[in-house]
Image (tube, grey):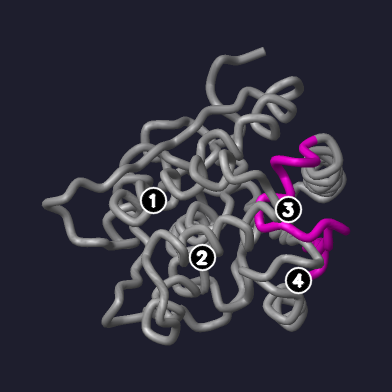
Amino acid sequence: MSNSPQVIWLNPNPSWRRFHRPLMQYLSQTRVLAEWEYSQTADEPSSLDIAVNLLDEYLCTLNQPVHLIGHSTGGTVGLLYSRRHPERVKTLSLLGVGCHPAIDWQAHYYVQRQLLPCSREMLLGQMVRSIVGSCSWEDTKLGIKILEADLLRSPSPHSLYHRDHISPAGVAVPLFVCGSRGDTIVDRRQLQGWIPWLKRGDRLWEHPGNTHVFHYFDPNSVGDHIRSFWQYHAQTCFLHPQAA
């Protein structure tokens, strides 16, 4: 098997790596998988465009189109990239990304910062429970540290004074969208909002869980659906190469 990556996991949220590792390890059993990581510095503006441009610099060094996968902001980076450079993308898999892709946990957080008269730590604790579900105080404290780091290092385009917007639209490459039925960050309405934009061969799957990091708690089931999607398109390209 070639050592050239076949799958690129997009991770512009380095502090979230622990949530992605189980699924990455499961998928890497059958595909050569690489992780692309971006972490903005304090001197950089919070910009998805910078992340997309840096991703393009990397993918231009590869000799073939690849499968892109991303959760939340990582998925949004993959979506924006696939709209600009579909020729370099074999398929795109979005986890926890709604039809309005800019809506992420930070968008919810900053809205609540304006509306709720509570401390930053208390609000971040509430966000931890929204993302991972009920957990112990020790796990909540760890989650707060993860979210604090994400506020500093993620290219999510939101702030206390501005919430960005990305209009709903499809993408030319084969698309797999996966979300959790009970997710309060990307709710079911946001997930179902993809339906008008799906092409023939695209897939939308609702995981029966109720967390934003459903792939962390059930990597095998999520991984099997992604593999099935890849296999379907591999067979389609084999049978109808002119459509590839």
Disc 2 packing (10 Å; few <14; some 14–19; many ≥20): many
* Label 1 to label 2: alpha-carbon separation: 10 Å
Q: Which mark is residue 94?
A: none
Part of the protein shown in magenta? 198-219
Residue 190 seen in the figure = yes
Question: What whole-number distance in Å separates the C-alpha atoms at marks 2 and 4?
Answer: 28 Å
Q: Is residue 165 above or below residue 3?
A: below
Name the secondary structure under disc 3. helix
Disc with the residue nearer the chain's start (1 vs 2): 2
Which residue reaches farthest bottom? Answer: 115
Q: Which residue is labeled 4 in the image?
A: 199
Q: Are marks 1 and 2 in contact (CB under 8 Å)?
A: yes
Judged by depth in the image, the label closer to the viewer, 4 or 3, is 4
Among numbered discs 4 and 3, the one appearing first in the sequence:
4
Residue at x 16% of width, y 50% of height: 42
Residue shown at 74% from the left, 83% from the top: 196
Mark 1–mark 3 contact, CB under 8 Å?
no
- As shown in the figure, which amino acid type bears the numbered disc 3? Gln
Q: Nearer the viewer, residue 217 or 12?
A: 217
Can you identify the residue that label 1 sits on? 150
